[in-house]
Amino acid sequence: MNMKTRTALLTSLLMTSLTTSLQADVSGNIAVEGRYFSHNGLYPLQENSNVSISLQPEFRKRWDNDRKSFTFIPFYRWDNNDDERSHGDIRQLDTTIATGDWEYQAGISKVFWGVTESQHLVDIINQTDSVENIDGEDKLGQPMLRVSRIFDEGSIGLYVLPYFRERTFAGASGRLRTPLVVDTDNPRFESSDDERHIDYALRWNHTFDAVDLGLSYFDGTSREPELQQVGASLVPYYRQIQQVGLDLQYTSDSWLWKLEAIRRENADTGYNAAVGGFEYTFVGINDSSADLGAIAEYHTDSRDKLATSPFQNDIFLGARFTLNDAQSTELLAGTVFDLDSNSKTLRIEASRRIGDDIKINFEAQAVTDTDATDDPLLHSLRADDFVQLEFQRFF
Amino acid sequence: MKIKKIILATCLGLMASVAHAETSQEKGLRIAKEADARDNGFKDLTADMKMILKNRAGKTSTRNIRIKTLEVNGDGDKSMSLFDSPADVKGTTMLTYTHGLKADDQWLYLPALRRVKRINSRNKSGPFMGSEFAFEDLGSQEVEKYTYNFLREEPCGSGWTCNVVERKPAYQYSGYSRQVVWSDTKEHRLVKVDFYDRKNAKLKTLVSSGYKQYIGHYWRPATMNMQNHLTGKSTTLTWSNYKFRNGLTSRDFNKNSLQRR
């Protein structure tokens, strides 16, 4: 039996026993996704159209007024072109117990920190599942132990992360990839404990009236690898880092003012990065029930051109259109302008519910005016403009 | 004898002048305060709400939402709305700290990203989940949120007599110029509300029915029907599983506790 068959068998066994023994609440979704790339790929083996199917069942058990919970969310995606994108993961398999001022969590889970829309700088607990989508919002399940002390206006939480998850990367036949393929089978680690290095994180958050403030600290294996060229491929190298993060939001009637800032250090060097801006909402435009949000965010990174993210001196301008109708129709469109290289990235996301159980998600992305030396990351995506349509059936 | 008569006359005069001193505004406010006091001391409440949206053609769609409310002394209540359906929003949770005239504090939990977002509550007049209920219709009804004017007393079905009170939102960004509220004189149960839009046209009517008394004191309706007169659409809320005093605390209404779902 290969690894995939074993995982599938184990998962189905676990599911059946869970549903029967726990009488858990079962839900989830199955989705068919079609992607069409408008240009031919830059590399051989790449196709212009892609079909993919994903399945995510969710098992939940809640008791004692939701103070105790058990959750199991496995995930699997099958992709017709890219073997690296055909992958499975346990998104969540954990239990949470809250008693009075304390909350305990153990298992595989997902944690989100941050406030801004166009980049998630402070968010660091979970590894990015980058084959899912290049927006960085899909995450792999992270094994963790958490203890939190709850206060009236906030909380403080300590995380122990005993096992590291490697980032996923597109394979040779996948689109949206680096010119050289990332060899995910031979990762390198700075720590001699490899992926078994125990990471720690601490987060405090507090609400001061209209202000929500979060301060966080992380010490452990960087979720973002350095890609080192070895022969004809890239090998991910995971360093040990320390990161201090701040996230801040001021909320008023129509304005949201947001700031995320980090200081990250490894044994050799360090850098600062920040993203900040606002979202202004026009409520009930033209006497309808629709809302229109205008978003502007500025990105900076002290590494300038050496930055490993495309956001070193960029402005994001976006519009969020919410119809507030029975079908929950939404549209988010945005452009990132690189103020150094003049490259532009355009992205549109829209969704609408059909009936009670089906959701249609639309996505499109285009990259223009990229430069090989100024913006190598974006430049490698110059031929990968795409439109994507996904049908999700919920159960 | 003469002295007795004088005292009696003075007393009657005083009573008349006291009764006369209460203007219709004062009477409206007094009724609102009485209704508020009638509901004091419930501590916390959980309930299941089924929301049935019906469009003009009669096509329906359903949402299932669990509601948890914590009574807060000296401020508006804290509440949590937990969405169970439609399936694509299952797990989405909204936490609201209601205040009197000050804007409410509101957080939204999005389960797909496990992200807690603080949202602005400017959108009071916007529809809740695409329904005919606006956010302001479902929020905690604090006394200071309105100014009041008592209109009349009249029979209002099932042998009840109702106070009819007009109230005008005193908070910012309401979608209404005024509301006319029918509540029964005995137990202050809300029977009917007419909502008038900013142009003073009758926009919606809410009718609550199937009242039952819980833990020997608190009255809650089984059904609330909101009819939109402009669009012909309606939304019916069916309430079940009312449970009072579950021992919930402020720790269960913390933005951290949103992620327990």
Image (spheres, grey):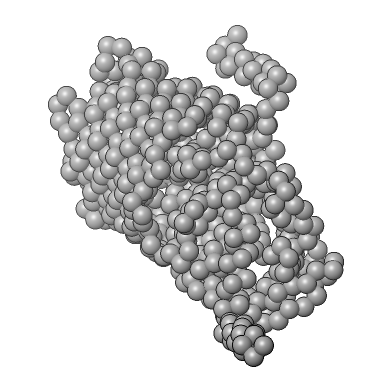
Q: In this view, does B147 lie to the left or right of A104?
A: right
Which residue is found at the position 23% from the left and 48% from the top? Answer: A300
- Is residue A145 visible in the rendered image? The answer is yes
Q: Which residue lies furthest to the right in this view?
A: B158
Q: Residue furthest top?
A: A1
Which residue is found at the position 38% from the left and 62% from the top? Answer: A252
Q: Is residue B80 above or below residue A155?
A: below
Count of numbered circles in the view: 0
A167 or A256, which is in the foreground? A256
Give the quarter of the figure containing the N terminus of chain A. Answer: top right
Q: Where is residue B190 in the image (x, y as percent from the top left)?
A: 70, 65
Q: Residue furthest left?
A: A268
- Is residue A186 visible in the rendered image? The answer is no
B207 or A323, which is in the foreground? B207
Which residue is found at the position 58% from the left and 41% from the top? Answer: B91
Give the quarter of the figure containing the C terminus of chain A. Answer: top right
Which residue is found at the position 69% from the left and 65% from the top? Answer: B188
Q: Position of residue A34 (x, y in %)?
A: 58, 42
Q: Is residue A342 left or right of residue B218?
A: left
Q: Where is residue B23 in the image (x, y as percent from the top left)?
A: 58, 84
Q: Where is residue B224 in the image (x, y as percent from the top left)?
A: 73, 60
Q: In this view, does B94 lie above or below A238?
A: below
Q: In this view, does B195 lie to the left or right of A242?
A: right
A167 or A250, which is in the foreground? A250
